[in-house]
Image (cartoon, helix red, strand yellow):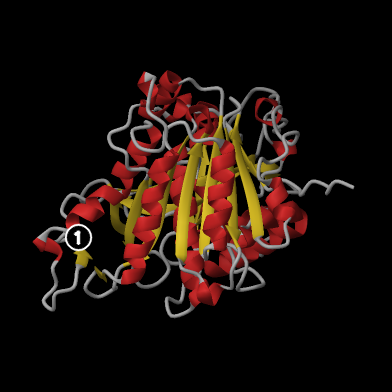
Amino acid sequence: MTYIVTLTPEQMADNEDDWLISERFTKGLPTGLDTSDTGTRLVFLVRDNLTRSTNSGSDGLAEHGRFITWMGSVQRINTVGPVDRSVTIEPMRRCPAPVPLDGPDGILASLPSTHRRHVERALSESAGHCGMETWQALQEALLRRHPELSRYIDWLLAQLNPLDFNVEDAADRAWQEQRDAAQTLTRVTDFPHSALSVWGRPASREEPYLAGLIPDPVENSLIDHDVRVGLGDQVPRFDDWRQRGDVRCDIHVLEDSTGRRLEVVNVNATPVESRLGTDMIYYHHPTHSFVLVQYKRLEPRRKEYRVNKQLLDQMDRLEQVSQLSTKPTRSHEWRLSVDACFLKFAHWRNGAASSTELAHGMYIPLSYARTLLEDDCTLGPKGGRIFSYERAVNYLVGSEFAELVKLGRVGTVGTSVEQLRDFGLQRARDGYNVMLGFETSNETPRDRAVRTRSRSAKKRPKMNSYSPPTSQQPQ
């Protein structure tokens, strides 16, 4: 289905500030409306000015008429009661300019009569939908008169239809893990998940996940001035990695209107067939602390991981990370443990998962992994060691791990940017896909805790997402 949600000017005004930040809207559906999960699942939000008696407002909309002002995708259909349903629209994007539906220049006038009636029927309720043939006619009319909308439609459709990963293919496995690492970074930093999720396979199997990122259609010129003021002038801290000949590096930046900034750096240095897996490294610059997650894939049927010499050797190397830490001397440097490294034993459902869904799995701190290896609970029937849900009962799930990282309860202490750079490059050279998140801000530790504990979307600042150009190499 392609949904059409119609709102009054007052309803639009009450919600738009929130939509710019949360990118989400839940709308009740008329009783009896078909909610079968078919068609595009795109949503057009229409501002209905037909009954408006005042003159045009500052937004330039005519006194009478209906206008498409926002677009989005139906992320899920909710059951409210025995009969009632609602849809959650996420993400949402504001159109670059209102698209008129009525009048001689409106979209409806260019539709064949049959499809025009179907759209009018959908517009007659607070929420309605049209079938695939009408959608195709509507899309053709929209792009003929407003070609700038093609990027928005393509981006939303790619969000709704993530690619399947072939777990038998080394490149697909690598990209699948890197996507999960990217989505984990948005969760521990409270940036929108959609910023790093819309993706198509890169041209080369050797390229990192970020090389296939489909950019957000919203350009800087369309974003409020308070978001744009800090953008574009700051050279990425890891920009020189893109100019190296021994690694492949891609960078994407997320920044909000307070100046809080996440530089996402995706780097590899070895052929995909010989890579050892994926590392996620998150560095919080204000507290000079980083956390590492190394990915391990559970056997899909039994959800088990059989311990081998390679894992033991990798754990030995990860334990050296604790030597980078200094002794905490201030209250915000206190940690729950010396663990800065975690193993994520992950498994993916068959088929394409949501582009923003994290892989299911266990986050296990390195010290707990050592304890498990000394406990009979991990002994297999033939004497080997096995990690599984049943054997590692104290594992963390994704939300628990993210909360600990957000609050600064885990991670190194007093780690410099130079140490981070050396460590990140070495991990890539050792054969890992590295997804590194480098966060900078003017937040105090208290500010960070207050933001993390705030559940109000209305208090969140506005955000922009962009891939910075590579700076010129020095002459």
Q: Is residue 249 above or below residue 418?
A: below
Which residue is located at x 85 percent, y 46 percent? 474
Count of marks overlaid on the render: 1
Image position of 71 (left or right of 449) = right
Q: Position of residue 197 (x, y in %)?
A: 52, 55
- Residue 373, given in percent of the width and then of the height, sits at 19, 60
Residue 211 percent location from the top left of the image: 64, 61
Quarter of the image holding residue 57?
A: top right
378 or 205: which is nearer to us? 378
* Residue 402, placed above or below residue 111: above
> What amino acid is labelled 1 in the image?
Leu
Q: Secondary structure at mark 1?
A: helix
Q: Which residue is mark 1?
A: 373
* Residue at figure coordinates x 38%, y 32% from the top left: 408
Lateral position of residue 295 relative to residue 201, left or right: left
In the rendering, at what x and y percent does residue 257 appear?
61, 27
Q: Is residue 1 visible?
A: no
Residue depicted at 59% across the width and 73% down the height: 271
Q: For this rendering, which residue is in front, 360 or 273?
A: 273
In the rendered image, which quarter is residue 457 located in? top left
The vertical placement of 324 against 157, above or below, is above
Observer able to see residue 75:
yes
Circle 1 crowding by C-alpha within 10 Å: few under 14, some 14–19, many from 20: some
Q: Nearer the viewer, residue 81 or 77?
A: 77
